[in-house]
Amino acid sequence: MRFLWLFLYSLVCAVLLACFSNIHDFTKYIFSLGALYLGMRFFRRFEGLGFRIWFIVIAVILYFIFSLIYALYTQMGITAP
């Protein structure tokens, strides 16, 4: 069950960081504050060093995956009908 929480926290944090890096107006800072708050909640809940390291590693890997997916999507040039 702890692994599921680790993955969910990392997933949401990665999505928030991907939104922060891809939005170019003032609202992007809301996503960065959300990621910071989520990281603080995770660090308060799980005090083990191993879980904290895995949280950061998984969040960064998922962030790169989501950023790559977004970049590929924007380069495809798909428009709504």
Image (cartoon, rainbow, N blue to C red):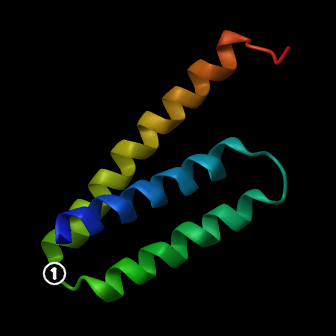
Q: Crowding at label 1, few (<14), some or many (≥20) Cα neighbours within 10 Å?
A: few
Q: Which residue is drawn at 36% across and 78% down?
A: 42
Amino acid type indicated by mark 1: Gly
- Provide residue 47's location: percent of width, then percent of height: 21, 86
- Quadrant in the picture for the C terminus: top right
Q: Is residue 48 above or below residue 34?
A: below
Image spot of residue 13 (x, y percent): 47, 60
Callout 1: SS: loop
Residue depicted at x 24% and y 63%? 4
Q: Which residue is drawn at 28% across and 54% down?
A: 57
Against 46, is 76 above or below?
A: above
* Number of numbered discs visible in the structure rendering: 1
Place residue 80 in its image quadrant: top right
Residue under pointer 1? 48
Q: In which quarter of the image is the N terminus?
A: bottom left
In the image: residue 51, left or right of residue 5:
left
Q: Is residue 47 above or below residue 53?
A: below
Residue 7 in which image quadrant: bottom left
Residue 48 falls in which quadrant of the image? Answer: bottom left
Q: Is residue 53 above or below residue 43?
A: above
Where does residue 64 sit, x and y in percent of width and height? 43, 38
Q: Is residue 62 left or right of residue 31?
A: left
Q: Give the x, y percent position of residue 22.
A: 67, 41
Q: Which of 61 and 3 is in front in this view?
A: 3
